[in-house]
Amino acid sequence: MEAVRTITLELPWPPSVNRYWRSIPLRRGYRVVLSREGRAYRRDVCARLAARRRALAGRLHVRVTLCAPTRRPLDLDNRLKGLLDAMQHAGVYRDDGQIDRIEVERGEVVQGGGALVEITEVAA
């Protein structure tokens, strides 16, 4: 597969998936909604990416380097869903179903944390 274009994004430290969604009890069952923290993160990502012109439309390869705010142990995969969801909501790509490959790695500890994301659109 040949790369069509690659974009690099510096984004804020994403909340854990355990804090991104909340279950609201109903009379019968539950309803899952975006939490207050999840909405704040999504707004932050959208504000940072407001200048983006058009969504990536092809098949995607995503490489994420998560730079934690502390040395505390964490599960890298718990940070991906909120990050990917926020980028979709911000219009980076149309749907996270476009992603064929995801690579995630732990980066250096940085004050406040952060996520470095490289997205490559590939020709089918």
Image (cartoon, helix red, strand yellow):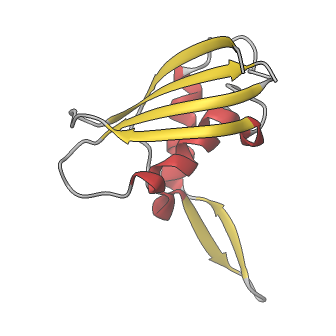
Residue 6: x, y in percent? Answer: 60, 14
**Count of numbered circles in the view:** 0
**In the shown orientation, is residue 12 left or right of residue 1?**
left
Residue 75: x, y in percent? Answer: 37, 58
Query: Relative to 99, is 10 above or below?
Result: above
Locate the C terminus by quadrant. Answer: top right
Residue 3: x, y in percent? Answer: 67, 14
Residue 75 visible in the snapshot: yes
Residue at the (69%, 37%) spot, across then down: 99
Query: Relative to 123, is 102 above or below?
Result: below
**In the shown orientation, is residue 71 left or right of residue 87?**
left
Query: Relative to 95, is 32 above or below?
Result: below
Residue 52 visible in the snapshot: no
Q: Which residue is outermost to the front?
A: 1
Residue at the (48%, 64%) spot, across then down: 18
Query: Relative to 58, is 25 above or below?
Result: below
**In the shown orientation, is residue 14 left or right of residue 108?**
right
Q: Which residue is outermost to the bottom?
A: 28
